[in-house]
Image (cartoon, coloured by chain):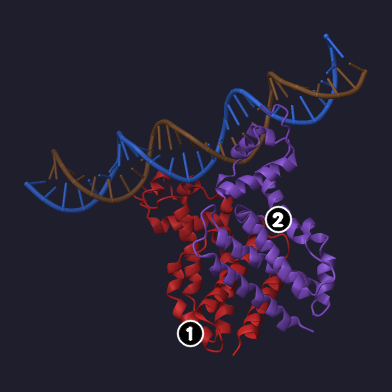
Chain colours: A red, B purple, C blue, D brown
Amino acid sequence: MSPAARIDTEAIVHAAFDVLDREGFAALSMRTLAAHLEVKAASLYYHVPNKAALLQLVADRVARQVVTAFVPGRPWRELLHRMARDLREALRAHPGAAAVVAVRNASPEVFENAVPLVLSAMHEGLRVTDDEALHLVQALYVLVNGLALAEFGETPEPPAAPAAYYDAWFDTAVSTFLDGIQARHGA
Amino acid sequence: MSPAARIDTEAIVHAAFDVLDREGFAALSMRTLAAHLEVKAASLYYHVPNKAALLQLVADRVARQVVTAFVPGRPWRELLHRMARDLREALRAHPGAAAVVAVRNASPEVFENAVPLVLSAMHEGLRVTDDEALHLVQALYVLVNGLALAEFGETPEPPAAPAAYYDAWFDTAVSTFLDGIQARHGA
DNA sequence: ATGTCATTCTAACAACGTTAGAAAGGAGCG
DNA sequence: CGCTCCTTTCTAACGTTGTTAGAATGACAT
């Protein structure tokens, strides 16, 4: 068939999302993952130190996707609202990844580049220290991820309630948190 | 030694918290759990259908502890603030349980009894529908649990940052969310 | 003593993450 | 072409996991 189907870390992570999307977190084993790549399980360990590191790569990829969508120069509320929506969309697109992102939080390096952008946006219109600003952003990230986890908990079983229920939940929770920022730290 | 050390579901759940607290989530296997009870692993299956059900019992116990602490007749803000603090304390007392509670959210029955109490408290001073009120409470629950998960992620390794860092994070996040409720739905 | 019933046991299964070391295969060079 | 080197994948195995079937145990009632 494909004798020279060499693999690399990128291909492994991509296949991991594939398995996650199609069969859920529980089905993601090194063996099934290797099978998707037409390779034996031990071969994965040449490219990835272990499964925990692989899951970290998955979590980081989701976070990076959200972070790289940041648009400089926009007001803080738009920035955070977009972040919330982007994160939710990313987790909706990869439901099995929600369980990964929840437990393995993203590596600091992923966020580092975005820190100045976030701080400048939030200092423009809010009275917050740097620590407070970052705490608020991370709290929103955690909140959205927690909601997604409740919605997509054990995929690929579809959510228990209709999508509209979770839409309303998301809107209420995020808007309330953003209103809280405005009320508590608004200039 | 103790030949008639019969076990039951209660003893199993209690031992599960013991293992969780002492050695963390990763160490909680049916075999180590059975060993703590001086029993063989297969015996557990007479009292508990499987491990998932056992983890559900753990998650439900944490939630029940928080819910049964609700005090009727108090204003909504005090009620929610106490809930947040109680949940955090419960997870701090059982750090390994945070990972369980995050993934397996509590059974609806646990919250059912508390629904009228919560609704009456929130309708007293807020303009919210029943759905909105419950969404807000659940969102706060998810938020606090997510923060605890970031703090206690993989026990028994101590948190990466000093406790004061997480205290500040918790205070900022919870106060902001409560301010958001006040600002958005205050009467 | 005998039988009944609840509980725990032994033994085994398939699947998991992981490792050591052997095989494969192309690249560069004589 | 033949040889060596180096990267990558392989086979095979280890210990552990959740789970099940069916045999043993033991207390209690008859």
Residue behind mark 1? A120
Q: Chain of mark 1?
A: A
Q: Nearer the viewer, residue A110 or A30?
A: A110
On residue B61, the disc is: none
Residue at 69% across, 69% down: B139
Question: In the rendered picture of this protein, how many numbered marks are placed on residues?
Answer: 2
> In the shown orientation, is residue A50 left or right of residue D29?
left
Q: Is residue A65 left or right of residue A186?
A: left
Q: In the rendered view, would you say C5 is above or below A20? A: above
Look at the image and tell me whether residue B50 can be seen: yes
User: Which residue lies at the image location 65% right of the left edge and 73% below the top edge?
Assistant: B174
State whether residue B86 is above or below residue D21.
Answer: below
Residue, disc 2: B62
Pick whichever, B152 or C19, lies toward us: B152
Q: At numbered mark 1, what does the secondary structure look like: helix, strand or loop?
A: helix
Is B10 on the left-hand or right-hand side of C12? right
Please report contact status of discs 2 and 1: CB closer than 8 Å, yes or no: no
Q: Amino acid at mark 2?
A: Val
How far across and down, in percent of the image, does residue A25 sit? 57, 53
Can residue A163 be seen here?
A: no
Q: Splitting the image into 4 quarters, where does residue B76 fall?
A: bottom right
Q: Residues within 10 Å of mark 2 (few under 14, many from 20)?
A: many
Q: Secondary structure at mark 2?
A: helix
